[in-house]
Image (spheres, rainbow, N blue to C red):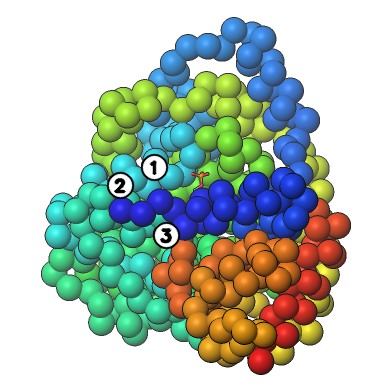
Amino acid sequence: MRPSGTSAARAAAKPAAERGRVIDFTIGEFALGTSDLVTDAAIAAVKGGKTRYTDTIGLPELRLAIAEQFSRDTGQEWTADEVAVTAGAKPGLFYLTFILLDPGDEVIIPQPYWQTYPAQIRLGGALPVHIQHTADGQMDIGSISEAVTERTRAIIVNTPNNPTGVVYDESHLRAVAEIAIKHNLWIIFDQCYRSFVYPPYQHHHLVSLIPEVRERTIIIDSFSKTLAIAGWRVGYMLAPPNIIASVRALQSHITSCPNVISQYAVLEHLRSDDGQFHRWAMGQLEINREAGLGMLQRLRDVPRPHAQGGFYFYLDVRELLGRRHVARTIDTVDDLAAYLIQEAGTATVSGSAFGDKHGLRIFYGVSGEDLREGLPQLVAALNALR
Ligand code: PLP
């Protein structure tokens, strides 16, 4: 097992970034602080003596508030016994490895993928089966269908997608749901980036499009990205009550409960937020996205990134591989990421962290200053390869 490639890239970039020598585009979290409402609620929880374990799968009032929010968002009724709060989305996903899979079972994952999916699946003794996305970044429905075997138990559907920045469209979601129903598979629907989608693209709740798929869908979601509190560790899962009961059993032996302070903070957010923080964050991201896309247009031989949702530009750099700069040959995307640190002073995440030999991920939720300084340097360095 290897540690997460994105974490490794972040760790490698951090010391140089702190010395001001490298602009860090490896980050995977919006870096401009969280809302006063959430901060104040956390402080109130600390001062109010909220020090104890909570219910294993979260405060009942928080689970209820999440269920109510989902009822509004999906147009269906959700109850608290279909909700488990976890210490970020990551452990929720990990529990599924033990709940849904036996050793030797297979899980279909569109590629490029967030590396944690196959790592967790392998830890449980099951097998990830990778299927390439189509050229426009949608799920390749034909290949998914062909990949189903007797051992297939689940398909991972991550939209908006990390790393590609694609938002899966309605027709592909409908098609993947049909496959799941036909072959009696679970869908693990990771929508952690759903709050960040740029018009005309639209995030679809799978269960709203195809209500029959709900009984076999596990929705993975998180406050990490939405509220910019990744370090506070609070995420959640919506699933049929028997799955939630299994999460309760597992989590009781693993983390006991999610962080109590974070739970009170997000509860206050769900009860009282007026959307101002999100509008502000989206405004910042939209400015950076527009500016960044403009700068990246100057790249030669690299297509425009999708950037439909989330906060990553994902570049297809295959045309640059094999090129040279002075005495240095760039054979792989790892070589390219290393070259960009040295020659452009910019840290990015190599596609190899996402099972992709041709990709490069650039986080654009950085400060406007960093974007205006770093991205032109990156573009110039890529254009200098011959
Ligand atoms: N899902 C995806 C696609 C992610 O990129 C991440 C984090 O980067 C997560 C889930 C997990 O987020 P957390 O555990 O912070 O809630």
Specify few, some or many for label 2: CA neighbours under 10 Å numbering under 14, 14-19, or 20 or more.
some
Say whether residue 208 is left or right of residue 97.
Answer: right
The residue positioned 33% from the left and 59% from the top of the image is: 118
Foreground of the two, 304 or 147: 304
What residue is pinned by disc 3?
A: 115
Provide residue 354's location: percent of width, then percent of height. 46, 66
The residue positioned 62% from the left and 84% from the top of the image is: 327
Q: Which mark is residue 96?
A: 2
Foreground of the two, 384 or 205: 384
Specify few, some or many for label 1: CA neighbours under 10 Å numbering under 14, 14-19, or 20 or more.
many
User: Quick check: is the Cβ at mark 1 less than 8 Å away from ligand 1?
Assistant: yes
Q: Quadrant of residue 204?
A: bottom right
Q: Quadrant of residue 255?
A: top left
Q: Are marks 2 and 1 in contact (CB under 8 Å)?
A: yes
Secondary structure at numbered mark 2? helix
Q: Are marks 2 and 3 in contact (CB under 8 Å)?
A: no
In the displayed structure, would residue 356 be above or below residue 136?
above
Indicate the amino acid at tag 1: Gly
Is tag 3's residue or tag 1's residue first in the polypeptide sequence? 1
Say whether residue 247 is left or right of residue 223.
Answer: left
Secondary structure at numbered mark 1? helix
Closer to viewer: mark 2 or mark 3: 3
Indicate the amino acid at tag 3: Gln
CA distance separating discs 2 and 1: 7 Å
CA distance separating discs 3 and 1: 15 Å
Specify few, some or many for label 3: CA neighbours under 10 Å numbering under 14, 14-19, or 20 or more.
some
Closer to viewer: mark 3 or mark 1: 3
The residue positioned 75% from the left and 35% from the top of the image is: 35
CA distance separating discs 2 and 3: 16 Å
